[in-house]
Amino acid sequence: MSLSREVPGIDTIHSVLSEAAQVELLPRFNRVQQEVKSDGSLVSEADRGAQRHIADAMRRVTPGIPLLGEESSVDETRALMAADDATFWCLDPLDGTTNFASGVPFYAVSLALIHERRAIVGAIYDPQRDELFFAKQGEGATLNGQRLAARASGPSIGLKLGVGLVDFKRLAPGLAHKLAVQPPYASQRSFGSVALDWCWIAAGRGHVYLHGKQKIWDYAAGTLILDEAGGRSSTLEGQPVFDGRYSDRSAVAALEANIYSTWFDWLQQASSP
């Protein structure tokens, strides 16, 4: 298989994701019941319908590349990811199911192409705003075709005046408490879609990011988009968020390198006993 010939362009991916959203997601927005899966996460018929729709479309577009979705079985997931040279699509058909079912217009479809344990293509589509965040390894990141890039000049806003996108419920209690009572930033938000959080940081719609535990479906495309936009990220332990393996990961991120460094250092001190 010649991978370069197999990889579809941005227009094709946009078409697949937007069509799935039009058919499976938008008609069900705020009209579905959530169910609790065995791992405690939530799912709805919208998640399942979108995954079926996208899987069928990607089989036609890239018949030689299998698709691994959030609604795939654990055994299927582990088997596909076991090989170091595996190539597959990694899909979250609906990131932000609680928002979607509750009528909160902040959710997304996330799709990444994984090759030899690296994300080489990432696409995150926001149906409510018709925004496609897209990145290809080594070629930069875009929002609806317009280049995303870290600010290269001018004074930095600095962490003290910044906005933090922070998910508190998956953090260690001590760290969460310090963030709540002594925040190092000016203001904090938690929107409920990990995939879009990555994109909003990449687009400068927030200055720093923190999440205590997210799955590969949440971060595979998002880490590539932020990286290609010039941003910085790591786990709380300073390791790459995406290591090509099936594991839950914490995430610390910022678009500007100096803010990332200040933010990471503050978190390390705040996490110390």
Image (spheres, rainbow, N blue to C red):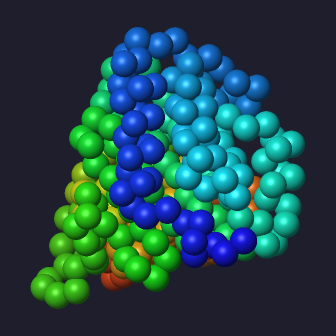
Find residue 235 and report its image quarter: bottom right
**Farthest residue in the left direction?**
154
| Apparent side of residue 85 relative to residue 55 in the rendered image (left or right) | right
Quarter containing the N terminus: bottom right
Residue 244 visible, this orientation: no
Front in this rendered view, residue 260 or 102 = 102
Q: Residue at x 85, y 61 (%)?
A: 82
Q: Is residue 26 above or below residue 201?
A: above
Q: How far across and how far down the image is residue 232, in percent?
A: 44, 75
The image shows a total of numbered marks equal to 0
Find residue 25 and report its image quarter: top left
Q: Is residue 164 above or below residue 156?
A: above
| Apparent side of residue 128 relative to residue 253 in the rendered image (left or right) | left
Q: How far across and how far down the image is residue 202, in percent?
A: 33, 65
Q: Residue at x 64, y 64 (%)?
A: 114
Q: Residue at x 85, y 66 (%)?
A: 83
Front in this rendered view, residue 202 or 40 = 202
Q: How far across and how far down the image is residue 203, in percent?
A: 27, 63
| Apparent side of residue 224 relative to residue 114 in the rendered image (left or right) | left
Q: Is residue 51 above or below residue 214?
A: above
| Apparent side of residue 80 relative to residue 205 in the rendered image (left or right) | right
Quarter containing the C terminus: bottom right
Residue 24 visible, this orientation: yes
